[in-house]
Image (spheres, grey):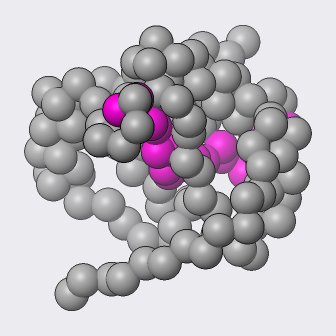
Amino acid sequence: MITIRHITEKDLSGLSHLYEELLGISTHLDQMLQVFKSAESSGNYHILGAFHEGELAGSLMGIVCLDLIGNCKPFMVIENVIVSGRIRRQGIGQKLMNEIEKIARENGCGYIILVSGEQRKEAHIFYEKLGYRDEKVEGFRKHLH
């Protein structure tokens, strides 16, 4: 059985392992804990975990962003979507996405932004099945060192 809930401090070690699988880099747990506490206290960060038989098997983060345009409805940005490779294709990703969309609606969000690496074609098919459209926008990123 899959359980979806907000990540807690005790889940951070497992989350770190998932992020390693996603990006191939280690997370510094002490720093992760400090940032997690800050994110939690803001109220705009929703870090969800999918637990399979009590073990963290997937996660994503939704951030509610305020907007000053038009009717000033907030929007959500989804980041760090991961389902462990050892347990994919069991509906975990869909359950995570459904729950974060529910949270976006509860927060009055008008839309959701989701970016995915160009090479992640399988993930793109998954997102399209959930109703996300490739709107052919250009994404830009500048790494600050």
Q: Which part of the image, by quadrant, shows the N terminus?
A: top right
Q: Does 74 lie within the magenta span?
A: yes
Task: Report the residue at 73% width, 67% height from top.
Answer: 136
Seen in the picture, residue 130 relative to 23 is either above or below; the reply is above
Residue 54 seen in this snapshot: no
**Magenta residues?**
72-89
Task: Report the residue at 52% width, 17% height from top.
Answer: 105
Residue 40 vs residue 51: left or right? left
* Viewer-closest of 80 and 138: 138
Residue 121 image point, x, y percent: 82, 65
Task: Report the residue at 29% width, 41% height from top.
Answer: 68
* Viewer-closest of 15 and 35: 35
Seen in the picture, residue 11 relative to 54 is either above or below; the reply is below
Residue 60 vs residue 125: left or right? left
Residue 129 vs residue 87: left or right? right
Residue 71 image point, x, y percent: 40, 29
Residue 59 image point, x, y percent: 53, 37
* Viewer-closest of 67 and 47: 67
Seen in the picture, residue 41 relative to 120 is either above or below; the reply is above
Residue 65 image point, x, y percent: 34, 39
Task: Report the residue at 80% width, 35% height from top.
Answer: 130
Residue 97 vs residue 62: left or right? right
Seen in the picture, residue 116 relative to 15 is either above or below; the reply is below
Residue 99's image quarter?
Answer: top right
Residue 136 seen in this snapshot: yes
Q: How many marks?
A: 0
